Amino acid sequence: MKDAWAILALYREQDMVRRMYEERHGGALNSTTGHSIASHFAQGREYFRSAANAAILVRPLLLHYGVVALSRASF
């Protein structure tokens, strides 16, 4: 799982997000949207990190929110 997070960590950088967006869509990405996408990746990682240290009753909820944050990061 650490390898997956290493790859996803690249998307926490706005420059990387902007470059990937331009390659995929051929247009420019405004800075607000780039910041939003990068933030969702960072938030998703923090939810998963918190879930690893959370009590068993809270862990599923944190994982759920982590998946939601990552899914909002799509471009």
Image (tube, rainbow, N blue to C red):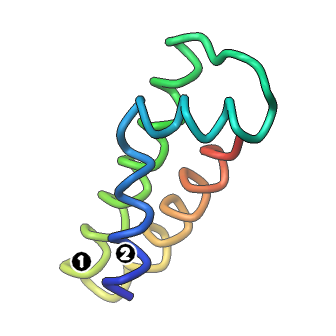
Residue 47 lies in quadrant? bottom left
Residue 74 has which mark? none
Q: Position of residue 52 (x, y in %)?
A: 26, 81
Residue visible at 52% across and 59% down? 65
What number is the disc on residue 58? 2
The disc labelled 1 sits on which kind of residue? Ala
Disc 2 to disc 1, C-alpha distance: 6 Å
On the image, numbered disc 1 is attached to which residue? 54
CB atoms of marks 2 and 1 within 8 Å: yes
Query: Percent from the top left, x then y, of residue 29?
Result: 64, 18
Residue 45, image quadrant: bottom left
Q: Residue at x 45, y 48 (%)?
A: 11
User: What is the quadrant of the C terminus in the image?
Assistant: top right
At horizontal 52% and vertical 37% (from top left) the residue drawn is 17
Compared across the picture, whether 8 is left or right of 33 comes to left
Give 22 or 60, whichever is nearer the viewer: 22
- Taking 41 as reference, is 29 left or right? right
Q: Residue at x 33, y 70 (%)?
A: 6
Mark 2 closeness class: few <14, some 14–19, many ≥20 residues within 10 Å:
few
Image position of 66 (left or right of 5): right
Q: How many marks?
A: 2
In the rendered view, tell whether residue 26 sits above or below residue 47: above
Going by the numbered disc 2, the residue's amino acid type is: Val
Question: x and y percent of residue 72 in the render?
Answer: 65, 45
Are there few (<14), some (14-19), or many (20+) residues within 10 Å of tag 1? few
Please, is residue 23 above or below residue 29 in the view? below
In this rendered view, identify the residue nearer to me: 56 or 68: 68
In-image side of 27 versus 14 (left or right): right
Compared with 32, 42 (above or below) is below
In the picture as drawn, the residue positioned furthest to the left comes out as: 53
**Which quadrant is the N terminus positioned in?**
bottom left
